[in-house]
Image: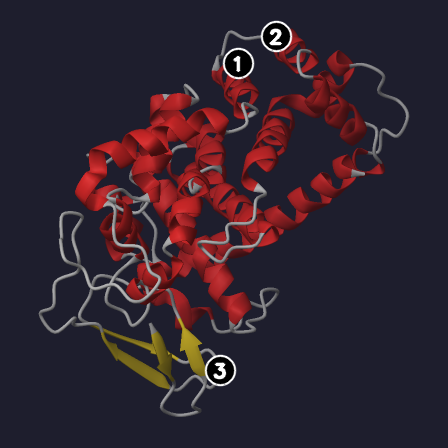
Amino acid sequence: MKFECPNCNKSYNVPDEKLPQKKKISFPCPNCNGRIELNLDPGGASPPHAGDQGAETKGGEKPPVASNNGDFRKKVLRKLKDLPPMPQIVFKARQIISDPDSEMSELADLLESDQAIATKVLKLANSAYYGLSGKVSSIRHASSLLGYNALGQLISMVGGAAVLGKTLEGYDLDSAGTWRHSLLAASASRILANRKAPDLEGDAFSAGLIHDVGKLVLDTYVMDRKAEFERLTSGGRNSMLAAEQHLLGLDHAEIGYEVCQHWHIPEAISTAIKFHHDPAQSDRDTLSYIVFMADSIANIVKSMEETEGTMAQMEGIEGFMYMIDDDALAFLGLTEDDVPDILNAAWDAVNKLSEEMQIIAK
């Protein structure tokens, strides 16, 4: 939705999926602190559904594929085999880390089975970042020095970067933006889990990291119908998921779940990805609510950056609180006052993670 502040005429363009399901919202302008009021009432018009026929198309645009949804779904699922297999080691490592009876030697053995990750672990352990330059000569030594949490996070990042650091032209996301959003969602998920359910910290980081993996699969098809996709996601009428459903007969959260099944990812993480846009449908699944809230926080960061907000001081965050769902806050035992602290902590964590990635990328 595009709108202007009536006081300073500052223009904003907020993706519809970030707007709450309310008829009217009011919030201060991040630029001048004047009041902005938006009426989100669609005027009785219903959004397009997957089964709608006769959708209007313009010259050169391809029509929706929802009419042959079964065949299209099979076509999409066949493409899953083309995804890199790297995440397998991520979740094997997560299983070891989450097992209270496991030993560090098991994790070291797993790392040694993947030369690419083993090399990066040794490089990070020997960096000045950890103050161990030139002192670590083996994976087992590095594992004992870095510990479970640091290793698990490192493995998740390295594995995730191989898949998630992609440019998604259909969604207008460059590789840096895609990766940074993933890291923010992962960091915020871990912080939220630490507050609500500490035993979910590891799974929360992994789920947050790959929550948008379905977009990797659908991007080609969205790009093929980009003009119509942009029309459906502008003007505040339809969310991104509704546009995906209308054009493709499925959405990125749904296909993200299928990706997780293909990778044999634990059901808890798969479920969170499936419901990360609508946790109310998850039968009160805590991890789904955590990833949903983390994604909202990551979207606030993106919007603040786009409107030149100052992250270091969190200026103007009040203007973006409309992105936060009150029911999700209540479920997680949070208030709006908690959000800036969580956002700041996630921002700091991403900066630290980025430093680590720069070290191992050299």
Q: In the shown orientation, is residue 332 left or right of residue 199?
A: left
What's the image's color scheme?
secondary structure
Q: Residue at x 25, y 32 (%)?
A: 71
- Badges 1 and 3: C-beta atoms under 8 Å apart? no
Residue 106 is labelled as 2
In the image, what residue type sits under mark 2? Glu
Q: Residue furthest front?
A: 59
Q: CA distance from mark 3 to mark 2?
A: 53 Å
Amino acid type, label 1: Ile
Give the mark, 2 or 1, whose residue is nearer the N terminus: 1
Quick check: 199 above or below 332? above
Q: Quadrant of residue 121?
A: top right
Q: In the rendered image of this protein, does residue 358 appear above or below residue 73?
A: below
Asked if labels 1 and 2 touch by Cβ distance under 8 angstroms, the answer is yes
Which mark is drawn over residue 31? 3
Disc nearer the start of the sequence (3/2): 3
Disc 3, SS: loop
Compared to 314, does 51 lie above or below? above
Mark 3 surroundings: few (<14), some (14-19) or many (≥20) residues within 10 A: some
